[in-house]
Amino acid sequence: MIKQIPAFLISLLIATFLLVTQTTATNLIWLKSINMPVDLQVVLSSMATDLVGMNSRGAFPVIGLIFVGLLVAFVTARIISIWSSIKKPILYAMAGGAALLAIVVLMPLAFYNLDLIAGARTLAGKVYLICAGMLAGYYFGSHPAKGVSNDI
């Protein structure tokens, strides 16, 4: 179980990176649509600032929210895998997608129907974030529990 921590942390970083960059891109697209000056320097600066800011400032860091969601989903998937014949990458991909689905659907319910994640305000944004969770889960499920092979 402890040997899976690096794979879990990498999958956490994948989901967090995709969520933050999608949220930033959504905001920048909106700014561009109202004729605000958005160039490559603004895009790169905003992405870097948001990757740090959304994970270190605010009431609750995004990485903490995703950490809890993926942890619950992956532990549940591990329990299901004991009795199921579903391949681990597929099972964990479904678990990662379910974790992000829960975040984008349940979070607004907790905050008076406000989508606090800007990238989750549209159906396309929600689908993208669920796919990001699936990608993170697929990564986690693709790495064996016994660690990395010694073959070179």
Image: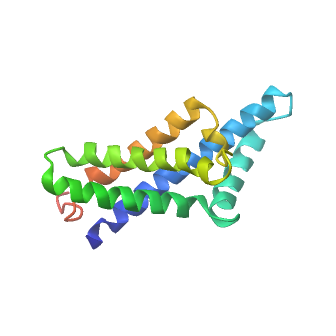
Quarter of the image where one finds residue 145: bottom left
- Residue 44: x %, y % from top left: 70, 45
Quarter of the image with the C terminus in it: bottom left
- Residue 13: x %, y % from top left: 48, 56
Quarter of the image with the N terminus in it: bottom left
On screen, residue 40 versus residue 9, left or right, reads: right
As rendered, which of 48 and 34 lies closer to the eye? 34
Q: Say whether residue 138 is visible.
A: no
- Residue 55: x %, y % from top left: 62, 62
- Residue 144: x %, y % from top left: 22, 58
Q: Is residue 31 above or below residue 106?
A: above
Residue at the (60%, 40%) spot, across then down: 120
How is this picture coloured? rainbow
Residue at the (72%, 32%) spot, across then down: 29
Q: Say whether residue 109 is visible.
A: yes
Please tell me how many numbered marks the rendered image carries: 0
Residue at the (19%, 60%) spot, across then down: 149
On screen, residue 130 versus residue 104, left or right, reads: left
Q: Is residue 86 above or below residue 74?
A: above
Considering every residue shown, the one lying at the far bottom of the view is 2
